[in-house]
Image (cartoon, rainbow, N blue to C red):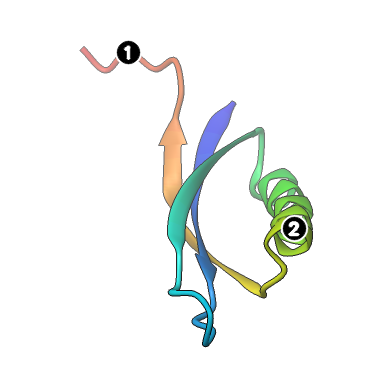
Amino acid sequence: MKQYIFSFYTDHTEQAKPVVWEETILASGMMEAFSKVKMLMEKYKREKGVPIRVQYKGVRYRHIDIA
């Protein structure tokens, strides 16, 4: 499993400042990670009531001992 890191952003509105947070998605491949992110985007959009933008930041490999 790999950890895919994404940044989520809310757009600036007149009532609220933009909010930025990171999510780590556990997935075996990029397509699985994007599917999970798409579901999270819809969930956050419903919860927060504002559009959500996402940016891919990178991948981190789990359980690998480099030493």
Disc number for residue 53: none
Disc tally is: 2
| Location of residue 41 by image quarter | bottom right
Q: Quadrant of the C terminus?
A: top left
Q: Which residue is at a point 49% across and 82% down the rendered structure image?
A: 12
Image position of 41 with respect to 62: above or below: below
Image position of 9 with respect to 15: above or below: above
Q: Looking at the picture, tell me which residue is in the foreground, 65 or 47.
A: 47
Q: CA distance from mark 1 to mark 2?
A: 31 Å
Q: Residue 53 in the image: x percent, y percent?
A: 58, 71
Within 10 Å of disc 1 (Cα), the crowding (few <14, some 14-19, many 20+) is: few
Q: Looking at the picture, tell me which residue is in the foreground, 17 or 52.
A: 17
Q: Which residue is at a point 67% across and 46% down the rendered structure image?
A: 33
Residue farthest toward the front in the current orientation of the protein: 15
Q: Residue 25 in the image: x percent, y percent?
A: 59, 39
Q: Which residue is at a point 52% across and 45% down the rendered structure image?
A: 23
Residue at mark 1: 65
Q: Is residue 47 left or right of residue 53?
A: right
Under tag 1, what secondary structure?
loop
- Of the residues tagged 1 and 2, which is closer to the observer? 2
Q: Is residue 34 left or right of residue 66?
A: right
Q: Quadrant of the N terminus?
A: top right
Residue farthest toward the bottom in the current orientation of the protein: 14
Q: Residue 63 in the image: x percent, y percent?
A: 44, 15
Q: Which residue is at a point 66% across and 33% down the rendered structure image?
A: 28
Q: Looking at the picture, tell me which residue is in the foreground, 21 or 25.
A: 21
Within 10 Å of disc 2 (Cα), the crowding (few <14, some 14-19, many 20+) is: few
Q: Amino acid at mark 1?
A: Asp
Mark earlier in primary sequence (1, 2): 2
Residue at mark 2: 38
Under tag 2, what secondary structure?
helix
Q: Amino acid at mark 2?
A: Lys
